[in-house]
Amino acid sequence: MTPEDILKHEPIVLTPEQRQSFFEDGFLAVEGLVSDEWLECLRQRSDEMIDRSRQYTESNKEYDLSPDHTPDQPYVRRLRAPVDRHPDFWKFAHNSVFTDVAADLVGPDVKFHSCKLNYKHPGGGEVVKWHQDIPAWPHTNFSPVTLGVYFHDVGEAEGPLACIPGSHKGELYSHFHPDRTWSGSLSKDDVLKAKPENAVNLTGKAGTIIAINCRTIHGSMDNKTDRVRPLLLYVYSSADAFTWMPNPTPCSKSGDIVRGEAAQRVHMEPYAHEVPPNWEKEGYGSIFASQRKETIAKAS
């Protein structure tokens, strides 16, 4: 669906002004929509997953682990496919305010694409360079949106997500190194063109929902506090959006309709862009591994 088509539907939980802001800027941060009960549940599940990671010494289909990870000092950068790790993560994906927000931004028929739970540890280990999402998992249209929820209050010091306003209306940049290996980020020259000095930090209290359009240029700086900053991220699209390359972060629920009905027609948006690697053959570690040129640890 196009933004014009989406806005013809009455909003469910977002205000008309919030929806307009999202389509104009390419991102949104909204406080007060996630209940305390859900927050406590998600935090508990996260803590359980971190504790479980102690039994592993290297990345696998469940975890992307830092090279510094040890049983005594767990250092999880990403919990992969959380909806496959505990039923509560899937319940939150299709039976919570998240699907209401998704419907307000992609239309009444909502498809689930993928999910992850990222952890930004103190220090500079999880700085995320400027990038766009859609080059890694292209769709037939630009409806995909990433929704995230902060488990704790996130201010400037915690290394919040930062987005460049209006960048979703501009160029689709290459995310390859000159040698054609995947970089997962814009080149230095392209970053300058994108004007990162205009970026907005998406800060907010615990439970804040952030929404990022698939073309929006975004990243995050280092965490200057002494605590880990978790961020649960789910990707949704309109039901009439279809992937045309393998999903780098698939899960058992990828492609499921979580609200409304399956599409009878595909919405094809004309655009030309580089074809990403075939993740099924080449494997995909995480954006952290790609941006640091680490050896790929396949997710399956």
Image (cartoon, helix red, strand yellow):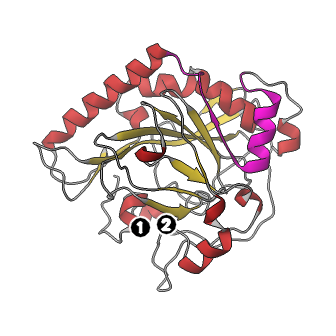
- In this view of the protein, can residue 266 be seen by the observer? no
Can you identify the residue that label 1 sits on?
A: 291
Question: Residue drawn at (55%, 61%), measured in percent from left and top?
Answer: 136
Q: Are marks 1 and 2 in contact (CB under 8 Å)?
A: yes
Q: Is residue 66 above or below residue 85?
A: below
Answer with mark 1 or mark 2, whichever residue precedes in sequence.
2
Report the amino acid beneath label 1: Gln
Residue 159 on image: x %, y %? 44, 49
Q: From the viewer's side, name the closer residue of 236 and 252.
A: 236
Does 264 sit left or right of 233 as displayed? right
Q: Residue furthest top?
A: 37
Q: Is residue 16 magenta?
A: yes
Q: Which mark is residue 184?
A: 2
Residue 191 on image: x %, y %? 59, 72
Residue 124 on image: x %, y %? 33, 58
Residue 187's quadrant in the figure? bottom right
- In this view of the protein, can residue 230 be seen by the observer? yes
The N terminus - image quarter = top right
User: What stretch of residues is rendered in magenta?
Assistant: 13-35
Report the amino acid beneath label 2: Gly
Q: Is residue 163 above or below residue 238?
A: below
